[in-house]
Image (tube, helix red, strand yellow):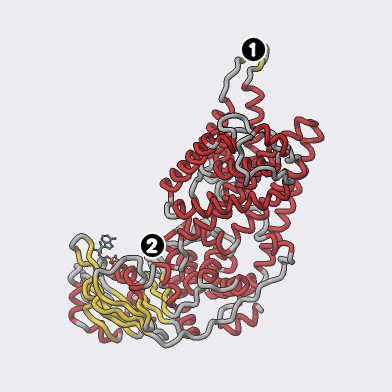
Amino acid sequence: MAEGAAAATGFPDRGAAPLASLPGRVRASNAARTAVCLALALAAAAALTLLFGRYGERIAVQMCVNVAAVVALGAFCGNTGIVSFGHGAFMLIGAYLSGLLTMPAALQRTALPELPALLAGWELSVWAAAPAVALAGLAFAAASGGAIARLAGASATIATLGLLIIVHGVALGAREVTRGSQTFFGVPRATDLAVALGAALLFIVVARAFRESRWGLFARAARDDAAAAEALGVDPRRTRFVAWCVSGTMATLAGALYGHMLGAFSPASFFLPLVFAQVAMMIVGGMTTVSGAVAGVLVATLLQDAVRQAEGGFTLLGVDVPAVFGLTTVALGLAILLVIWRRPRGLTGGRELGPGPGARLFAGLAASVEPAPPPARAVAAALEAQGLSRSFEGVAAVADVGFSAPTGAVTGLIGPNGAGKTTLVNLLTRAYDADAGAARFGGADLLAAPRTGVARLGVARTFQNLRLFGGLTVFENVLTAALAAGRPRARAEAIALRELAAFDLGALADIRAEALPYGARKRLEIARCLAQEPAMILLDEPAAGMNPAETDDLAARLTRVQAERGVGLLLIDHDLRFVNRLSSRIVVMNRGRVIAEGAPETVRADPAVVEAYIGRGRTASHAKLHTPDQTEGETT
Ligand SMILES: Nc1ncnc2c1ncn2[C@@H]1O[C@H](COP(=O)(O)OP(=O)(O)OP(=O)(O)O)[C@@H](O)[C@H]1O
């Protein structure tokens, strides 16, 4: 397809050649790395068992259960960026419910004589109880997730802590079900090494699949930049809700696993010490990745166990060291501090090992994806504003602005600093609410759309200050945009490849966006926009900070894409040579108002425009109201 794509799109072959084989290569290396990782985990568990007998087996089981619990926790925290202390609540529910459903009926009658009939006498196998436990976890997540998903950052973390405290309190109070603060016993000890290891591997695969899925990508995108995600049509609240439900269900099952490992427990077993330990493991390993969760557990479990040995006192070189209780918590706290200080992204450095979704891993990942052909030409429509106004504390940033920009053409939007250009874009895309006025695209009322609905009306934007999803790869940034536009996965991947080729980003596809050089970041933001296949794009200073060669290259790419797809561009830039070269019409703003509008040569001759630039202390010649070939990339 490389040659075919180049011929069809007119893009240079150098971008297309590495792209054609990119997904296959990436997936193959991921698959190999995961196979090695999982084999190592298995080998480590087996070695521990063989070397240390029962003691080693106990550590291995504990490690695997911790992997399941921390991977479940990371499915929310890693993807949304919100640290949760509430997952102990899910684990508590899972452990008690699975315990109730599986304990011997005779024992249950003695230990819990007042147990409600609905919960009594089931005596199920652990496997038969698991679906009910998962459903209960999902129901509890759905009930609590609505409130938690509305919050972000520290407020969300505090809310999760509140949830843990409430559930812990309820468990203490519901004596007829939980025996209150007394030990809840008689839970079959079904979590042996095989079960724990199998569960840990399954959780890793599910967590990886979720991370790479549509919703996982959306959650990570919203985590990295909520405003940019909204501009693509992604609702950050919904992504947090979905992540909370997936993660909560997994944590409930991990709680059951934990309960069947302990055999006897109380509400305190799921309270702050456990939650703190799990959060510590996640942060030590690296919160944003599944690999980080696994690495954190391996290191922290070994550390915890070593310190626990010392907790009861020991003799070192003939010196008796007395018992110091609470040493394991202190050690974990110190580990967190050390990691945050030396490696803020955790031991794994924020890198993910292994493949994407399990289904695709096992279904022949090496199959390559063909870049999509150019989309159908955008429909004839116009972006229109009338009387659009917005003030900030009495300052009219945009005042009674009316203009029109059609698809199939480039409309320049220029004006001195502070003229109101970015505010206008923010109004048109619903990032800001307008005080007055109307804005329509192709007949649709833009101002009536929700913030996440503008993209669906065919209007996309870039940002003056780059807003990429820094923790996502270049490929994922563009893929997220195509998925957010409602494209099925395979088509979205093909579209992503097409846009990476169009903006010469193929060789960088597997690099995290935050690690890109500046010019490539600017190109990526435009490629991400185009992956939505919009009819109109609002480009806010796409050439800012670029050198003349980069600007020329960008101009050529934009011209080609625009001509090929018939998309409309509203182009804001201070480089008037760049704007003049691309635009068929130019709108000029000053102090919030449109002061001139028309063909570039008409606008250049307009006294009000000359005045606006000279008024900023510049001469007419420096205002670059020249023909394109008279200037050399100067900026206003
Ligand atoms: N969120 C905000 N709060 C307060 N004032 C704002 C806000 N956004 C914009 N403004 C003000 O509105 C005016 C227009 O700013 P805007 O960024 O839209 O201009 P601009 O033409 O895009 O300028 P530049 O070319 O420098 O980016 C400025 O006075 C700015 O300080």
Mark identifier at residue 467: none
Residue 18 is left or right of residue 413, and the answer is: right
Q: CA distance from mark 1 to mark 2?
A: 61 Å
Q: Can you tell me which quadrant of the image ligand 1 is in?
A: bottom left
Please report the residue visible at 29 percent of the width from the left and 79 percent of the height from the top. Answer: 385
Under circle 2, the secondary element is loop
Q: Nearer the viewer, residue 446 or 321?
A: 446
Specify the amino acid type for callout 1. Val
Q: Is mark 2 within 8 Å of ligand 1?
A: no
Instruction: Say which residue label 2 marks.
Output: 465
Please report the residue visible at 45 percent of the width from the left and 66 percent of the height from the top. Answer: 522
Whole-percent x, y for residue 29 in the image: 70, 59
The mark closer to the camera, 1 or 2, is 1
- Quadrant in the picture for the N terminus: bottom right
Under circle 1, the secondary element is strand
Instruction: Say which residue label 1 marks.
Output: 319
Q: Quadrant of residue 434?
A: bottom left
Please report the residue visible at 59 percent of the width from the left and 43 percent of the height from the top. Answer: 93
Q: Quadrant of residue 261?
A: top right
Q: Is mark 1 within 8 Å of ligand 1?
A: no
Whole-percent x, y for residue 594 in the image: 23, 77
From what the image shows, is residue 8 above or below residue 180?
Answer: below
Residue 446 is left or right of residue 96, and the answer is: left
